[in-house]
């Protein structure tokens, strides 16, 4: 039974500590839309998404009002478009036409993002995969709410270095194509290793081929709640610290479970998973870096940061899995620089470098996320950074990702403003030594020996 103390406590979390349900994401399979005629394919995609998602935003708003729980975003994820468009698309511009359809229907139903302009190429690329990847600069520069993700590696298959090299070039071309908006297109493009099929968070969400025809996935978030809880145990030992994080994560996840079950019932769509990630926002008091500071490091990036983040990530998962039978997605702590005021402060103080962020990704939920870099960074250098992050994911059997934004026309010491949830970011320096010969070799980095589980 829920007692009045817990009701009051949850209300305080919402009103004072930035507790929210970050997103309700409706996953939709488009496999039954496949057609060899591009116009018919686009019509089928529009109609399927519209009919399935037309009540999503209204339902989310109703739940938010009735339960008093902020639901920040309502989103859609679809089957990777490289699979859906392969029979109809013969050029990159053909794929971009599907992106325009996704953008149109997403706006029609009122969601803030639609994900799934994606390809899964961890072992090799089909012609459709290559065409979709080559279309990304056009697709992201001519749409507003479409998000793209490419999975280039996995623990089971290794790393497709041809795809990594290509993505280094695509990130740069996307930056150029959206340079009038401070290369904003790159904020909607993420490169994965071990991408999950049920991730509700953008820009990496897509509806996996192992999923049902439609599914509800919910992402919860509460960095401010965790920080406030830890303020009450300041100076206590690690046992008390860990127990506090676990108990708080349990409470946060229960809120998400309630919203997920209610949305599933009202929409008539099966409940998929709760993603119990600590996803920060630019709002003051809603920062993962501030939690690390509360644990005991002066700034994110100081010695001890990686250990503190590992502790935080593990305790969040331990607390969250007790609160829901179906935990999935990414589930852990996000460390996006532009979306976390504490991370921005650490960069500006000189405490946090790209290399330290890479070390932190070994123990956190995703990877190098929303990091602005100089616009003149070479595409081979970007490919090298991607390869490093993919290797961390492959060897550690975890999801890792890269969302770098080379801001055309800007350099180290300048800042870039993205607005809204995407925040602002200082341009971070990048190692200038060359990795050209490495990324230009071509082929695949083999899977590690511990991938052989059968």
Image: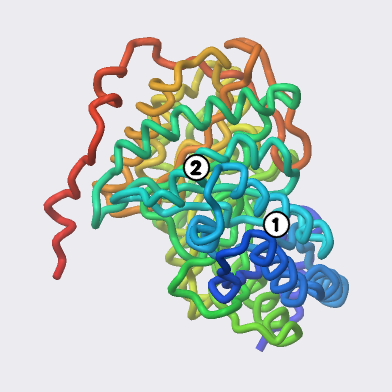
Q: Residue at the spot x=59%, y=69% of the render?
A: 253
Q: Is residue 211 left or right of residue 202?
A: left
- Tag 1 secondary structure: helix
In this rendering, is residue 228 above or below 43?
Answer: above
Visible residue check, residue 364: no
- Tag 2 secondary structure: helix
Q: Which mark is residue 102?
A: 1
Q: Is residue 258 left or right of residue 385?
A: right
Mark 1 or mark 2: which comes first in sequence? 1
Q: Residue at the spot x=16%, y=49% of the render?
A: 448
Q: How many marks?
A: 2
Q: Residue at the spot x=40%, y=46% of the render?
A: 400
**Picture quadrant where residue 443 is located:** top left
Mark 1 neighbour density, 10 Å: few (under 14) some (14–19) many (20 or more): many
Q: Which residue is mark 2?
A: 133
Quarter of the rendering occupied by the N terminus: bottom right
In this rendering, is residue 143 above or below 426?
Answer: below
């Amino acid at each position: 039974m829920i007692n009045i103390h817990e009701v009051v406590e949850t209300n305080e979390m919402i009103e004072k500590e930035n507790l929210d349900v970050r997103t309700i994401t409706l996953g939709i399979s488009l496999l039954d839309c496949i057609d060899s005629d591009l116009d018919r394919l686009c019509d089928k995609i529009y109609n399927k998404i519209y009919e399935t998602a037309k009540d999503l935003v209204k339902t989310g708003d109703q739940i938010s009002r009735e339960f008093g729980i902020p639901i920040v975003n309502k989103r859609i994820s679809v089957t990777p478009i490289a699979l859906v468009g392969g029979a109809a698309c013969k050029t990159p511009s053909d794929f971009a036409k599907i992106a325009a359809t996704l953008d149109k229907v997403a706006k029609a139903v009122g969601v803030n993002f639609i994900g799934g302009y994606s390809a899964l190429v961890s072992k090799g690329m089909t012609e459709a995969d290559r065409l979709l990847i080559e279309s990304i600069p056009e697709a992201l520069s001519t749409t507003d709410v479409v998000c793209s993700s490419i999975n280039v590696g996995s623990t089971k298959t290794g790393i497709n270095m041809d795809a990594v090299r290509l993505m280094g070039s695509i990130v740069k071309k996307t930056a150029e194509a959206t340079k009038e908006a401070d290369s904003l297109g790159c904020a909607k493009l993420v490169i994965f290793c071990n991408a999950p099929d049920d991730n509700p968070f953008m820009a990496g969400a897509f509806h996996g081929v192992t999923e049902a025809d439609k599914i509800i996935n919910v992402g919860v978030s509460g960095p401010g709640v965790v920080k406030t809880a830890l303020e009450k145990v300041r100076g206590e030992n690690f046992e008390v610290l860990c127990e506090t994080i676990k108990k708080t994560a349990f409470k946060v996840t229960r809120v998400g479970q309630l919203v997920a079950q209610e949305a599933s019932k009202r929409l008539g769509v099966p409940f998929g998973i709760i993603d119990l990630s600590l996803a920060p926002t630019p709002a003051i008091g809603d920062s993962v870096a501030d939690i690390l500071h509360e644990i005991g490091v002066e700034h994110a990036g100081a010695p001890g940061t990686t250990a503190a983040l590992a502790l935080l990530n593990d305790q969040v998962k331990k607390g969250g899995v007790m609160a829901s039978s179906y935990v999935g997605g990414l589930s852990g702590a996000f460390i996006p620089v532009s979306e976390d005021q504490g991370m921005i402060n650490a960069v500006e103080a000189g405490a946090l470098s790209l290399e330290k962020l890479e070390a932190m990704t070994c123990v956190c939920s995703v990877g190098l996320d929303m990091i602005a870099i100089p616009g003149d960074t070479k595409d081979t250098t970007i490919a090298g950074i991607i390869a490093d992050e993919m290797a961390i994911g492959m060897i550690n059997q975890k999801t890792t990702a890269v969302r770098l934004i080379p801001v055309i026309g800007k350099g180290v010491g300048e800042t870039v403003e993205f607005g809204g949830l995407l925040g602002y970011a200082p341009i971070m320096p990048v190692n200038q030594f060359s990795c050209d010969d490495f990324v230009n070799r071509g082929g695949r980095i083999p899977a590690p020996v511990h991938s052989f589980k059968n």
